[in-house]
Image (spheres, grey):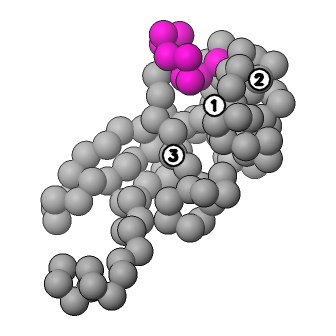
Amino acid sequence: VPNAEGGMGFVLQLSYANGNDPEGWTKEEIQTYDGWGHDSGRTWRTADRYESEGFENFKSTYGPKAFGLNHRFYLHLDSSNRMWLSAEDGCEGTPSKAPQNLFSRLLG
């Protein structure tokens, strides 16, 4: 996603897998989910595939080259009171910090 915050081109989209979220998991994602499988063997969905599965505005929202890999996860606070994401496949981490300009660095 070219304009994603953080400058890495990635977006973490939080959504429901219960069928009540228009930007949530598709039926096919729910049916084929394998969170414990290695990422190389899991289904990486292209923008075309998402739209064919019913996520009608995927390309206009994220771009025609965007793709996705669904994960189940939870958010919690770590011992330093930072938000932490833990996915069931072992992916985890904290959000990246936004770049600061010189004024913000000097005055906090």
- Which SS type dominates the magenta stretch? loop
Q: Amino acid at mark 1?
A: Asp
Looking at the picture, does residue 66 appear above or below residue 94?
Answer: above
Nearer to us in this view, 106 or 8: 106
Looking at the picture, does residue 66 appear above or below residue 97?
Answer: above
In space, the residues marked 2 and 3 are separated at their CA atoms by 18 Å
Q: Mark 1 packing: few (<14 Cα in 10 Å), some, or many (20+)?
A: some
Q: Nearer the viewer, mark 1 or mark 2?
A: 2
Looking at the image, tell me whether mark 1 or mark 2 is earlier in sequence order: 1
Which SS class for mark 3? loop
Determine the residue positioned at 50% across, 53% down.
91
Residue named by callout 3: 12
Residue named by callout 2: 51
- Span of residues in magenta: 17-26
To which quarter of the image does residue 82 belong? bottom left
To which quarter of the image does residue 47 belong? top right
Which SS class for mark 1? loop
Determine the residue positioned at 39% across, 68% down.
98
Q: Amino acid at mark 2?
A: Glu
Q: Mark 3 packing: few (<14 Cα in 10 Å), some, or many (20+)?
A: few
x and y percent of residue 106 in the render? 22, 89
Residue named by callout 1: 34
